[in-house]
Amino acid sequence: MTLDPRLDRLRESAARRRLAIVASAAVPLVLAAAALALRVGGVPATVATALLAAAIAAGIAWRAWRDVDPAWLARRLDASSPAMDDSAALLFRDTAALSDLQRLQQTRVRARLADLDADLRPAWPWPRLGAAFGIALIVLLVAALWRPQLGGVAGADRKAAQGAANATALARVRIDVTAPAYTKLPPRTENALDAKAPEGSRLQWNLRFDPEPSAAALVFHDGSRTPLRRDGDGWRGEHALTASTLYRIALEGAPPPADDRLHRLDAIADRAPEVRVLEPEKTLTLLDAQQKTWNLAFEASDDYGIAGAELQITLAQGGGENVKFTERTVALQGDPLAADDGAEHRRFRHTLDLAALGIAQGDDVIVRLLVTDNREPKPNATRSASFILRWPPEASSDAAGLDGIVQKTMPAYFRSQRQIIIDSEALLAEKPGLEAEKFLARSDAIGVDQRVLRLRYGQFLGEESETRAQHGEAREQAAAQSEHGESHDGAEEPAHGGADEHAHDAAGAPGKFGEAGDIVAEFGHVHDIAEAATLLDPETKATLKSALAEMWQAELHLRQGRPDEALPYEHRALEFIKQVQQSTRIYLARVGLELPAPDEARRLSGERKGVDDRAGSLVAATNDDVAAAALWRSLASGGAPDYAAAETWLRARQASLPDALGVLAAIDRARRDPACAECRTALRDLLWPLLPTAATASVPRAAPDAAGRVYLDALQAGTGSTP
């Protein structure tokens, strides 16, 4: 409902008074806290403290404004005016929702409200405001009398604070960086002694010292020096950044600089171009009979720009030992892919005219892209992978006149497990449009394929053949295979004889007398294959058994016309087959140790001709990481570290270690301030990833305790021998 204008004015005046009271108490406290934070922690602490105090004050003010609601206003009216008859709450209720008596009382209260002269604003809480101002004054006095102490500064910071008056200050620090021209980067200026720049950049230092030294130089960690020359009120020096390095400023005739640590210069290497092939999508493409051209497309990118690209084309003609290679190169002009000149990212397209190239049947065309960048003096080059366009050779005509003997197509393969899954999913997708009988027939045909595959893998586990008493089912399988009529490229293995391979053929040739193998083959039943028994380890056999169990279940549901229930078993069988195919353990038959026969004529003769010296053929093991490990142990134990040996070890492996310069800088800090525990800890942390992996060793047997000694004594007394 809409409030009476007079009630609304009373509410706003009361809310403004409450906000004024909160602001009067909060402003001096916030300013005092900010002043104290400035003296103790500096500008960052001041900003954080001021923001936190302002947020707290804003929360209190918002709550004070929110508390001035109709309920509060009704209570204040009832308390300040007896004419309200403790019925001021009726002024804030909807008339339609009141009873007759309440509406009559509401009308009377509204009539009295017109003649009411009340001030609902809360009184100023002067005692509380005085306390807030007093607290703020005390905090300001503490901030004014605060003096930072150096007692809490540790290690290098304490030393720097105590010796700042005796050190040379750097009044001006400027490093002008001029990148190589091929990068097209503008010159820039660094105002710190540490810098990063492209490899090959020219760095020019412009320094000013207070007090002025008689000579100055830049000393690099490899021992080289760059003298600084006097130029007006400053000192200048130049250096070519060919590799990342560390350096410090050395002064003569003046105290060392206040910041006397090693400074780092990082050289950003120019990356080689990156090439991405768009067309063709495959590395080997078979030429179509109607194809006249071959479309090629590449994309290349570089951090500083691409200088050129050329397509290397190789034509291989002939066969056998009479292969002739013809090479040619085509320069390509790329199209920019950016709004600017696009030198950093370009796309290259080219269409090969196969007729002009002279390709014939049986030939191969090999292409690859070579991209170079603008690096100087030697550009970076990247070659793409080779892509081949092959004209398939003519079919062999060796089978002329043998049409009745030689097969023109590959024999039917049993389906792979993956192909069975694909067929099952395709059958389920076509189920709404198939008749029930046809759907059942196709599902049964897939089940036959699953059975043949199960039998083929079952031979490796010595499973029984199911074809001796089921020739009718074998004929059904042959009919199903002839119905499908195609080979399946995804088969794991071709069926050598299908399901009949393991059957007992009574019509086979009888075994020869005295040959046990033929007798077993004729009258017995072999439940395993010799190769499978030795080439499959127990774990692989267990996995294969799991695959066969899943195939059993899949075949069951397929033969019943429920391919949807067979799919989970088919997928699990495929996973087990993949595990079997990835198995690499092969068990070979054991053979005895065959030593060469000794020459009896040379026994006890002392003749050593042809006998090698075992000691001379052995190479002593070397541990090249002794220096790093020794330094790490000495830092942990508090001994005297050998920094020189560690530095030599680091410089020899600077190219292979991830951050050798960082470790060298940490060694320099720890060496220059032996009392800095923080420096030694930081150096140990950097050395830990570089330490060699400890070799495994046998744990010595611990000495027996009292109970163990009693047990050994009892054994000795019982056996009458010493342990």
Image (cartoon, grey):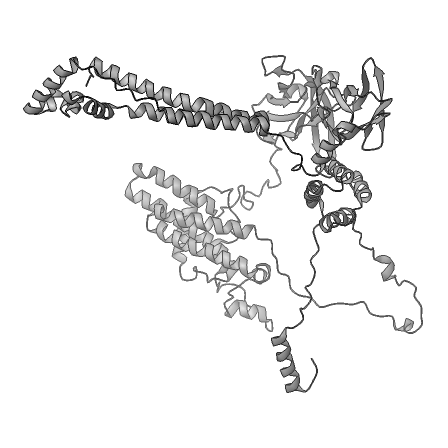
User: Looking at the picture, how far across and down is residue 368, in whole percent?
Assistant: 67, 26
Using the rendered image of the protein, determine whether residue 49 is visible from the camera's viewpoint. Answer: no
Task: Please say whether residue 13 is visible from this viewpoint.
Answer: yes
Closest to the observer: 375 or 102? Answer: 102
Q: Nearer the viewer, residue 613 or 269?
A: 269
State the image coordinates of residue 138 (x, y, percent, origin top left). Answer: 51, 28
Vertically, is 110 above or below 472?
A: above
- Quarter the N terminus occupies: top left
Furthest toward the left, the residue is: 100
To which quarter of the image does residue 231 belong? top right
Q: Is residue 676 or residue 391 the one in the foreground?
A: 676
Image-based side of 96 in relation to 126, left or right: left
Q: x%, y% of residue 451? A: 42, 53
For the C terminus, the image quarter is bottom right
Residue at position x 74%, y 29% in the image: 164
Q: Residue at x 43, y 44 (%)?
A: 421
The residue under the point 59% across, 28% down is 145
- Total labels drawn: 0
User: In the displayed structure, does residue 384 sit left or right of residue 551?
Assistant: right
**Residue 627: x percent and y percent?**
78, 47
The residue nearer to you, when weighing 441 against 82, is 82
